[in-house]
Amino acid sequence: MDRLVNTVRPYAWGSTTAIPALLGTAPTGEPQAELWMGAHPGAPSRVDRGGGGGGGLRPLSDVIAADPEGELGARAVRRFGPRLPFLFKVLAAGSPLSLQVHPGLAEAAAGHAEEEARGVPLDAPHRNYKDTDHKPELLCALTPFEGLCGFRAPAETAGLLAALDVDSLKPYADLLHARPEEDALREVLTAVLTADHGEMARTVTEAAAAAERLSAQDGPYRDACTAYASLARHYPGDPGVIAAMLLNHVRLQPGEALYLGAGVPHAYLDGLGVEIMANSDNVLRCGLTPKHVDVPELLRVVRFESTPAAVLRPEADAGGEEVYGTPVEEFRLSRFDLAPGATATLPAGTPQILLCTSGTAVLRTADDGQELRLRQGESAFVRAAESVVLAGDDARVFRATVAV
C-alpha cells in the first residue's frame, strides 16, 4: 500500500474552496479545479518507494513501469498494456466547463493517425487527438452537482425555444418539429455552430435575457433557464450557449452519478464530485471555451440521438461494496460506507486507488497486517499483488479499479 501525494490542477473554472475543504487545507484564493490520482504523465501521483530525489517520493508511473505485472496484475497488463488505464479525480467546478464530446475507439485511432500523418504537433492548440484511446467517464456527486448531458428530445427542446420567444430561435424550433430526430439535431447544431458570429452573438444576448425571464417564473423550464442564463454571463455571445439548450439539464444529489460514453455532448456546471475516466486526453469541444473548436470533426463524432440523462445509483453486493455499473473495462468505481467495527476485504489481482471522502479509513494488508490510515481527502494505491482489509470509523471510501 502507498499513500498518494497528488497534484491539484488550477484550471480557471475551478472552485476556490471545495477541494481545500475536502483536504482540510486553507484556500489560496486561486481556483483549484481537479485533484489527480493515478499515473497520467501530465501529473502522476507520487509514492514513497525510495530512490530518486524528493525525499524518496517517486512518480507512480515510474513505479508501474518498473514492475507492470506486480503493480497492475497480469490480467490488466494483458488487456491494457503496462500502464494504469484509468485516471481518478476529485473535480470541483466553480464555473461551467466547456461543452464537449469524446470520441470512440475507432474515431480516436483514425483521428490520431490522420493528425500524425499531417505532422500536427501533439502540443498544438488545434490538435484534436493526442492519443489513440477513447475517453468514457463517470462523475459521482459529493455535493449537489449540476450539469448538462445528452440531447433532450427534439419536441421538448422546441417547446423550450418557443417559450423563450426569440425570433432568431424560431427556425430552430421549426426544424426540431419538422425533421426526423437525428436529422433535426444535426441540422440545428450545425446551424448554431456555423452561424455568422455577429448574428449569433445577438441571438445569445436575446436568448439569455429570455432565459433570465423564465428562470424567475414557475414552470417546466425554470431550472434549465437559470443554467442557460448563467452560461451566457460566463460566455457572452458564445454559440455554445444555444447549443447547450439542446441538452438535458441535470441535478445530481450526493451519491448519484452520470456515465458519459462516446459521442455524448456534456458539460459540468457546478459542484464537487469524484470522476473516473479512461486515461486519454481526447476532447472535441462544442463551445463555452476560448479553446479550439473543430466543427467538422465535432459533427462527425457527435451521436445525434436524444437520450434521457440516466442518473446512476450504486448497487450493493453481499460484501457491502456499492458499485456504479458501467459498460467499460478500463475502470470500475464503487464505494464503502464503514460504521465503527465494520470491515471489508478487497481482493487482490487488480490495481486499486482508494479515496476517503469522510471519516477515517484504515487499510490493513491481509498477509502481514501493515496499516495505513486515511483521513478525509487522502488516498492510497494498492498494488495488484496485495490483498487489503478495509475498516473505518464512520468512513466513506471510494474504490477505483479496472473491470477485467
Image (cartoon, helix red, strand yellow):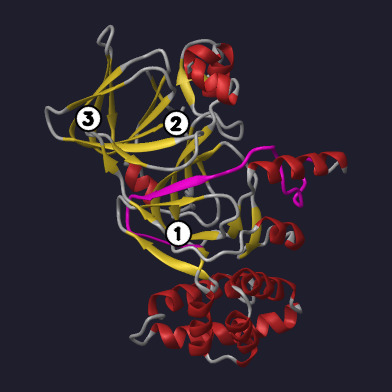
Q: Which residue is mark 1?
A: 94
Q: Which residue is mark 3?
A: 319
Q: Magenta region's main secondary structure?
A: loop
Residue 155 vertical position relative to residue 60 in the rendered view, above or below: below
Q: Are marks 3 and 1 in contact (CB under 8 Å)?
A: no
Q: Mark 3: which secondary structure?
A: loop
Drawn side of residue 18 relative to residue 307, left or right: left
Q: Nearer the viewer, residue 71 or 403?
A: 403
The residue under the point 51% across, 88% down is: 164
Q: Mark 1: which secondary structure?
A: loop
- Most extreme residue toward the top is 368
- Asked if residue 292 can be seen in this view, the reply is no
Is residue 128 shown in magenta? yes
Mark 1 or mark 2: name the one nearer the start of the chain.
1
Drawn side of residue 185 relative to residue 49, left or right: right
Task: Give, as a three-letter code, the residue at label 1.
Answer: Gly
Mark 2 or mark 3: name the one nearer the start of the chain.
3
Horizontal and vertical percent position of residue 191? 71, 76
Q: Mark 2: which secondary structure?
A: loop
Range of magenta residues: 121-149
Q: Nearer the viewer, residue 228 or 278?
A: 278
Q: Which residue is mark 2?
A: 403
Q: Indicate the quadrant containing the N terminus: top left, top right, bottom left or bottom right.
A: top left
The residue under the point 50% across, 39% down is: 328
Q: Nearer the viewer, residue 299 or 130?
A: 299
Horizontal and vertical percent position of residue 250? 41, 64
